[in-house]
Image (cartoon, rainbow, N blue to C red):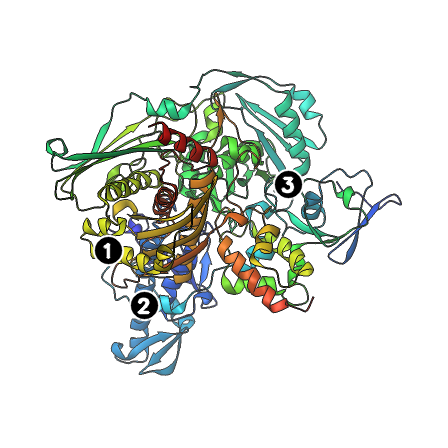
Amino acid sequence: MSPRPAFQSAPHLGDWVSIDQDGAIVLYSGRVELGQGALTAIRAMAAAELGCQPDVIRLQSARTDLSPNEGPTVGSMSIAQGGYAVRLAAAALREQLLMIAEDLLPAEREALTLKDGIVFHHGEKTELTVGALAHKVDYSPALTEDVKILGKGLVKAMAPRRIGLRERLIGTPFLHDLEPEGLLFGGPIHPPTMTSELVEIDLDALRARPGVVAVIRDGSFLGVVTESSYETARAVRWARNNARWRETATAPDDYMQALAGANEPFKQGFAKGDVEAVQGQRYETKVSRPYLSHASIGPSASLATWQEDNLEVYSHSQSIFDLRDALANVFAMDQEQITVIHHPGAGCYGHNGADDVALDAALLAKAVPGRPVKVVWDREDEFRHEPMGAAMVSHASAILRADGSIAAMSVEVTSPPHANRPGSSGLPNLLAATYLSNKMISPQSQDVPLEIGGGADRNAIPIYAVPNMKVSKRLVHSLPYRTSALRSLGAYCNVYGIETLMDQIALARGEDPIAFRLRHLDDPRARAVIEAVAADSRAIREEDAAEGTGWGIGFARYKNTEGYCAVVAHVQVKDIVRVTDLFAVVDVGETIDKDGVLNQVEGGMVQATSWTLKEAVTVDGTHVQPATWNDYDILRFSEVPRVNVRILDHATEPPVGAGELAQGPTAAAIGNAVRSAIGIVVPNLPISRDAVIKAAMDASND
Amino acid sequence: MVSPVTPKDLKLKVNGIERSIPTDCDTPLLYVLREDFGLKGTRFGCGTGGCGACTVIADGKAVTSCDLPASAFAGQTIETVETLATGGDHPLLTAVLKLQAAQCCYCLPGILMAAKALLDDDPSPTRERIVSALDGNLCRCGAHPRIIRAITEAAAETGGAK
Ligand code: FES
Ligand code: FES
């Protein structure tokens, strides 16, 4: 998919940039900072066009009453779309400033440049400054792609520094830290499952708990407002223990089995050639991953205030405009009566509880008009009530010709939907909205269509040069758990399946897995990252393999249209799998913020290592079980591999995101490394101690 | 809640300042630091000692502050992340800023305090000692490799000058 212009809904120059009364350039980006450093890169792109240092540009944080509506900050599209629009806007502003200067001086346009807020003529300073020209700027023109871009290459050389890093380390940058005058603290008591109803709670007794200012019940929504966050925590705990709920649904004993045996129909998403007609040696693998938690370190939080008929909400949502519309839907208000202001939370890695907690805060604040109410979910809320990353099964098969080339590949994906963001269905899609007395049940999500990147079937189309292919998806709606986007969506599991299948075939043929992949790739950029990662990891691949050690490779092009990433993993297996080293080489087109890309890829690899080795959400019937970190262990410092990432820069290609490149390739590299270490494939993730033992037993029984 | 000083108050020293809390204060130290003392650099992550986001140093040791009442810290000397920037930047802060060893940073204050307790005790720790000192601190963004590098660099700075 080519970078879609993000400026369709915000077409004018003034939607993106302005010059304030001090002569400072102000940037309005609808993108939000999620800890991924996107705004750092986007501001640097503007600075390169305007010939200034990034830090002199003021960044207006995203809010629904001021910022361009760019849609959600998701799918690694911030740089490709948001950055692209900002680059065009900044370049257009520069051209206009120089045109104004051309008239004023007068001087010929070609001799004028802009640097550090001053107009230069033939490299000599003039008296004209951006501040002095500001009043003549016309912000009404529409943005066009027909403007000269100076910044390519410049931005990378600028090596922008992360915005606000110091404040994030020792200051109070988070939503959790907001403390406006008159602040009260709210806490929801969520029904224990998506399918239970509140039967009974002694509201008077709850009201009498220490510090309680207000108690709210609406349908099965229950909440308290108190004077301090600890009083809220205690009141919530009391209410959880004293409320009676009725469960209205049942769940299968084993959700993975239920998924694997689902009988909803498969829908074909992509096909070329005729897979059915191909004859030859058949290989296949069926891999799966369990439900995963976003497991943000900082729980979801929001702050809401009602002033008469207006609602103001601070949120770390990825989609503040959709959240505003969803809230308007719940409260039957006009969009203009609601302002959603983005304020940082902890890293979210997809659609977590950020939007849901905003509705909780708005519902609770309604009971105390004029007073701001802050809601910070507790850890149990965060694990049990956020939308999880969907469990899924990916079944990949290939048919080999006698000459050893792959003639056909098919991938069949079975999964609950990976998309359930607010507003995406015309209904709010917010947790509490589903159990207010005026229930607003979200319709079944149809997942993300393959044409715009796919959801469960993201990266299900094998990237290899194979003449016959078929990809189909079976969406399962029968499991009583809430799922939505988790970093890379279905790509993680689909790449695990396809890439472990590639190794399975190469091994069966006695062929080197790297050479086997290269033989099936004609895209030079794909070949380049694989060759580069092979070179970077050569020493470790060629060292004498000690007992129980091995290496493996994994490769993908994210969404088949975005960045390229090849990973080599080295593992040591003794009861448990330890990943000792990871190497990655990526190609994200034009590199805007080199350190930002490295940081995103490293982080993605570490997170994927955690998913791959350790993580699974356990359920008990309809209950999502984890309540504390004891119930959901993630990778710890002592388990983190050495990580080595290199970028192949392609300044002439459009820049694309880096945050979701590495998940699938990392999982596949680890899976393949485990096979080379102990001769066993573990198809069902995670590759935990138990899974290794079980796979070994299955293998010896064969 | 912290009420006006009474003779029965317990004392603790926080970042060099004497503070008092009522003897019966059962509120965990974390909430008292954030909401009563205005020291909001220390973060709430889980409230059950499981993530390390709330780590502070008490009498020289890194401890979680979310799961013990403030009264349990009576008589102790507490250091929070804010001290890393008082009277010049601590080498740990300098190194993390220089290497941009963070993503969302929510975990970082707790990690910095665990690392400071380590460096105070062992100015030139091995990688093994660093990762074992940080094993109670979770980071979901996967900034670990950079954080380990930053601590190693800070150790080289402080090495010997305990
Ligand atoms: S908040 Fe204290 S350990 Fe998690
Ligand atoms: S940097 Fe985000 S949790 Fe560590």
Q: Is mark 3 within 8 Å of ligand 1?
A: yes
Mark 1 residue element = helix
* Amino acid at the residue labelled 3: Gly
Tell me the quarter of the picture where residue A168 sits: bottom right
Tell me the quarter of the picture where residue A60 sits: bottom left
Image disc number at residue A153:
2
* Amino acid at the residue labelled 1: Arg
For mark 1, what is the residue?
A527
Mark 2 residue element = loop
Q: Residue drawn 73% across and 39% down? A: B27
Query: Chain under label 1?
Result: A
Is the residue at mark 2 from the same chain as the one at mark 1? yes
Mark 3 residue element = loop
Pick whichever of labels 2 and 1 is earlier in the sequence: 2
Is the residue at mark 3 from the same chain as the one at mark 2? no
Q: Residue drawn 50% across and 63% down? A: B99
State the residue in front, B20 or A505: A505
Decide: marks 3, 1 in contact (CB < 8 A)?
no
In front: label 2 or label 1: 1
Q: Residue drawn 68% across and 69% down? A: B161
Say few, some or many: other residues with alpha carbon within 10 Å of mark 3 (under 14 / 14 to 19 / 20 or more): many
Query: Chain under label 2?
Result: A
- Residue A428 visible in the snapshot: no
Q: Residue drawn 44% across and 19% down? A: A251
Residue A619, horizontal then vertical, whole percent:
48, 26
Tell me the quarter of the picture where residue A225 sits: top right
Distance from the alpha carbon under mark 3 to that under mark 1: 47 Å
State the residue in front, A18 or B30: B30
* Amino acid at the residue labelled 2: Gly
Image disc number at residue B49:
3
Image disc number at residue A380:
none
